Image: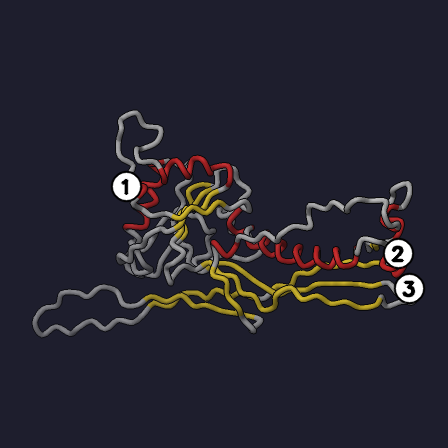
């Protein structure tokens, strides 16, 4: 166990324990908390240990029938469930009574504030594992209804009679004008779980900071960028995309299109308890202080189709 003792100060004069020896205590981790997951997920509250969704599909299309023929009777299609079980995350620190009493820079308060920031950012980093490994089907959060990774070439629906409900939400191509064209076509022709047209419209272009200039040029240019033909860029600018530069994306070529305003957008975070801090005396005779923080949340997806993964 790491314990913050007076020996933590290895300066020659033990500057942390004296007044007037330091102009300030510089710590650039004592900054504003940075989180980004809410831009890519439904941020939901719960008081349940498990949330469970069941995928189903309504009726297939009607059939022409002859005079006197019985009308076909059909029922909905039921599929698998997706469970979201609460996971717990925590960390903390311990400080000796002597260090707390004699340091002159309020280290206890600084560490407590740092603990609150670390808890929130740890949650953000954890949630982004599914977006940083969208082609993996072995993530801690599991998979969606069809058992495949987020980005997959043959996602399956629920039509028992054909494969018209299959779809691919993975382009595997660099961000470009033609890639955005492919993305628009994907949403404009999107099908539901019975293989029937449902449509969609991407409202957000999500990308790594490495692609910021490319994203701005592609969506903000009057003329088609990187093209000497003087062709209009109206097809891209008319998409009305909101740019979301996400520094939590670790891939240098990662970008996606998302329809996050759609009620069926199904990337979810369920929080049962925000980071809660606990302070107590050490369970021995040292009079040390122990501060811990605990939170409960879980995340994942059920239906991945409203996120079109351009590249990882």
From the top left corner, tell me how far across and down residue 143 is, in percent.
49, 56
Q: Are marks 1 and 2 in contact (CB under 8 Å)?
A: no
* The quadrant where residue 76 appears: bottom left
Distance, label 3 to label 1, CA atoms, is 69 Å
Name the residue located 90 percent from the left edge and 40 percent from the top edge. 12
Query: On residue 235, which mark appears?
Result: 1
Distance, label 1 to label 2, CA atoms, is 66 Å
Q: Secondary structure at mark 3?
A: loop
- Residue hosting label 3: 286
Name the residue located 63 percent from the left edge and 54 percent from the top edge. 122
If you read the primary sequence from the N terminus, does the residue marked by circle 2 or circle 3 appear first? Answer: 2
From the top left corner, tell me how far across and down residue 60 is, in percent.
25, 64
If you read the primary sequence from the N terminus, does the residue marked by circle 3 or circle 1 appear first? Answer: 1
- Residue hosting label 2: 102
Name the residue located 49 percent from the left edge and 61 percent from the top edge. 268
Name above or below for residue 18 compared with residue 96.
above
Using residue 266 as the reference point, say whether residue 108 is left or right of it: right
From the top left corner, tell me how far across and down residue 19 is, in percent.
86, 50
């Amino acid at each position: 166990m790491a314990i913050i003792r007076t020996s933590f100060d290895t300066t020659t004069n033990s500057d942390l324990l004296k007044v007037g020896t330091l102009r300030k205590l510089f710590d650039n981790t004592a900054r504003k908390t940075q989180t980004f997951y809410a831009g890519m997920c439904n941020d939901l509250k719960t008081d349940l240990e498990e949330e469970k969704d069941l995928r189903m599909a309504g009726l297939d299309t009607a059939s022409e029938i002859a005079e006197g023929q019985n009308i076909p009777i059909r029922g909905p299609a039921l599929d698998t469930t997706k469970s979201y079980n609460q996971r717990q995350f925590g960390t903390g620190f311990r400080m000796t009574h002597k260090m707390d009493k004699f340091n002159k820079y309020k280290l206890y308060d600084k560490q407590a504030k740092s603990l609150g920031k670390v808890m929130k950012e740890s949650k953000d980093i954890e949630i982004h594992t599914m977006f940083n490994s969208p082609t993996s089907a072995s993530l801690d959060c599991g998979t969606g209804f069809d058992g495949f990774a987020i980005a997959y070439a043959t996602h399956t629906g629920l039509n028992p009679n054909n494969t018209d409900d299959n779809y691919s939400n993975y382009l595997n191509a660099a961000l470009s004008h033609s890639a955005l064209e492919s993305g628009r076509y994907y949403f404009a022709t999107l099908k539901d779980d019975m293989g029937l047209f449902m449509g969609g419209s991407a409202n957000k272009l999500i990308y790594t900071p490495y692609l910021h200039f490319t994203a701005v040029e592609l969506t903000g240019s009057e003329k088609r960028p990187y093209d000497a033909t003087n062709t209009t860029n109206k097809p891209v600018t008319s998409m009305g995309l909101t740019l979301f530069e996400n520094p939590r994306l670790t891939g240098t070529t990662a970008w996606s299109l998302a329809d996050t305003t759609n009620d069926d957008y199904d990337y979810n975070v369920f929080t049962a308890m925000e980071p809660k801090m606990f302070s107590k005396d050490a369970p021995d005779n040292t009079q040390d202080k122990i501060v811990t923080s605990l939170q409960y949340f879980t995340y994942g997806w059920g239906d991945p189709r409203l996120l079109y993964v351009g590249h990882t």
